[in-house]
Amino acid sequence: MSDMPSQGAGAVLAIDLGAIVANWRLLKARVGGADCAAVLKADAYGLGAAQVGPALAAAGCRQFFVAHLDEAIVLKPLLPRDATLSVLHGPLPGSEAEFVAHGVRPVLNSQAQIDAWRALAHRLDRELGAIVQVDTGMARLGLDERELRALADDRGAFFGLRVELVMSHLACADDPAHPANAAQLVRFAAARRSLPQAPASLANSSGIFLGGDYHFDLVRPGAALYGLAPAAGAPNPMRPVLRLQARVIQVRELPAGTPVGYGHAWSSDRPSRIATASVGYADGWLRSLGNRASVWAGEVELPIVGRVSMDTVTIDATALPPDALRPGDAVDLIGPSCDVDRVAAQAGTIGYEMLTRLGRRFSRVHRHGVDSEPTCRARRAEERTIAG
């Protein structure tokens, strides 16, 4: 059975909110007494923050993170009143008052952001809460050592501010043996001594699996919530979250030696059956997947041949019986037999990029259980054979 919501959908992305909730619960259980947040930046890694946020809130999550203020403004009304929504990039110059107006908490990443937030607190004559981030070895966001020393010497640096959390971000946590993990842990402990006493947060998705020393008071998973493997090369403990299917447009028989697609990047070395499916790089199905990736018709793997076009891919369906795959049938691009991390590796990238590139042109279906039944006539015929 296909996840296609209508006969007019060329491709559909089915997102299992129940699996996302189950992944959050697994991570929360793993960190014991620490709180477990949810990172919903980039529209919940492309899977729909407006749906994922409320589902996690219903499960008990109350700490949420996004990257930009605009993301927070859209998401805030969809979350419970007692939820806290924090913006990782902090306030851009001139935007500080909007944080207060929308009840959103900034992550302060620099001396300039701290100064601007403190100045707003002075103008409003009220204490303002915030998170302070320190850079412990990523050189991306957060206070550096020079700024930390200056703050330690300034008794009024945090006057009017309520530091509710001190955080940093791990650079190499997906490699548990990397020495940078332990080095960042040591630097984080030192940095906290230069800042007001507050709860602490260091672990991202992968950092959770480094052990209890990295958990502190709050962990901030993102990718693992959405089914990506938290440690490279290790078994993935997370539940799969999505299924991407494309509909077949046309099937044709080709004689041996027939070139296929742009640039004639592939030619048949035998009589072949080529199916054209409705997905391409305009949908985020990366061009680099041409001649590398596969689709799945039930449990049968079919290679993508030739280049990925803007709107289509061509598939060698010769392994199937002649009438097994017809126009209108759906094939899996990501699903039970081919997870996001595998497809990303075939594209020469990482699961994070693969997820966030999945385009808005897909029909999107959010549900609490992804249908795992067969997607083409070949699998249905096989089941009838087994049953009869």
Image: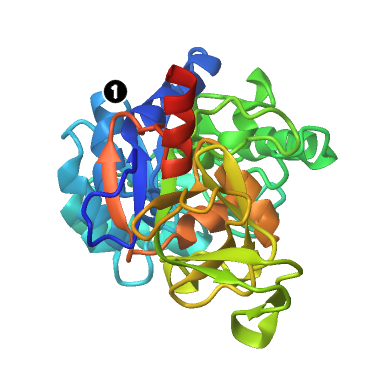
Q: Is residue 297 above or below residue 274?
A: above
Q: How is the image coloured?
A: rainbow
Q: Position of residue 194 (x, y in %)?
A: 61, 40
Position of 52 relative to 247 (above/below): above
Name the quarter where the C terminus is drawn. top left
Q: Quadrant of residue 116?
A: bottom left
Q: How many marks?
A: 1
Element on which disc 1 rests: loop
Tell me the amino acid under the disc marked 1.
Answer: Ala
- Crowdedness near tag 1: few (<14), some (14–19) or many (≥20) residues, C-alpha within 10 Å: some
The residue lying furthest to the bottom in this view is: 263
Between 89 and 95, the one lying in front of the other is: 89
In x, y percent, where is residue 29?
A: 49, 15
Question: What residue sits 79% from the left and 42% below the top?
Answer: 180
Residue in the foreground of this view, choosing between 212 and 373? 373
| Pick the front one: 278 or 250 | 250
Q: Is residue 343 above or below residue 15?
A: below
Is residue 203 in sight in this rendering? Answer: no
Q: Give the image location of residue 268, x and y in percent.
A: 71, 71
Give the camera-side residue of 114 and 309.
309
Tell me: 377 left or right of 171.
left
> Is residue 222 rendered to the left or right of residue 75?
right
- Identify residue for label 1: 59
Q: Is residue 37 visible?
A: yes
> Whole-percent x and y of residue 186?
75, 34
Q: Quadrant of the N terminus?
A: top left
Residue 303 sits in quarter? bottom right
Q: Is residue 70 left or right of residue 302?
A: left
Q: Residue at x 63, y 29 (%)?
A: 236
Residue at left offset 29%, top offset 23%: 59
